[in-house]
Image (cartoon, rainbow, N blue to C red):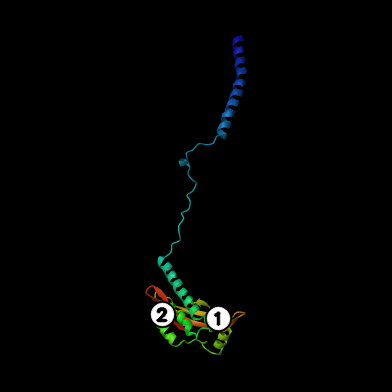
Amino acid sequence: MTRPKSVLIGILAGVPIALAAFFLLGRDDTADVQTAAPTMSPHEITPPFSPPETRLPDTDSDELDRSDEIFAAESIALQGLIVAFTWYPAIDTNANDALVRARPWLSRSLAERMLVDARTERGPSVQWGQWATEGSRIIADVSLGCSGCPPDSSTVIRRVATIRQTAVTADHTESVDPDLTVWVTLTKDVDRWLIDEIRF
């Protein structure tokens, strides 16, 4: 009985020591596991979702070409009308001189018609003579609209133009009333748009 009792006491005395050692060693290992950074190859990392595809909106190339054509035609209309309705009475004989300057934007048939008989509502007159005496420049500002215009085609575009003129002298500016409203027809000549008709 003495020997088994001493063995039992030894075992019981060793259990707390073994538990304490296991607890301390196990806790350190667990701590290491919890704080250690996972090691993973960059190739093994996969995002939780795929990035969205970046795509340009579908656009009809014909529509883009058409838009470019309209822009080109309207640019010609604006440039040509600004030149045609900007006058220098001190040096111009009449409004025909402005039409000569606008020739690069006009079709041949329009240039021939308008240079023969420039039918503007303001031509050489008492007002023209006054502008000439004062050394005025008549500056045109043009805006385009298409309300009531027929549909555009690949060779003909029609617009309504509002032309506002301002008489500018050395010491003052004055609006020229009333504004002019004209119908403009542009036609495609090979690869360039030209003003083919100006109708008051």
Quarter holding the N terminus? top right
Task: Say if mark 1 contacts mark 2, CB within 8 Å.
Answer: no
Q: Position of residue 171 (x, y in %)?
A: 62, 79
- Residue occupying the far left of the picture: 190
What crowding class fits label 1: few (fewer than 14 Cα within 10 Å), some (14-19), or many (20 or more)?
many
Q: Which residue is mark 1?
A: 137
Precedes in sequence: disc 1 or disc 2: 2
Q: Nearest the camera: 41 or 135? A: 135
Q: Position of residue 111 (x, y in %)?
A: 42, 82
Q: Which residue is mark 2?
A: 107
- Kindly indicate the quadrant of the structure image that contains residue 106: bottom left
Q: Nearer the viewer, mark 1 or mark 2?
A: 1
Query: In the rendered image of this protein, does residue 92 appear above or below residue 192?
Result: below
Query: In the rendered image of this protein, does residue 82 appear above or below residue 52?
Result: below
Asked if residue 157 can be seen in this view, the reply is no
Query: In the rendered image of this protein, does residue 71 appear above or below residue 37?
Result: below
User: Which residue type carries mark 1?
Assistant: Arg
C-alpha gap between disc 1 and disc 2:
26 Å
Classify mark 2: helix, strand or loop: loop
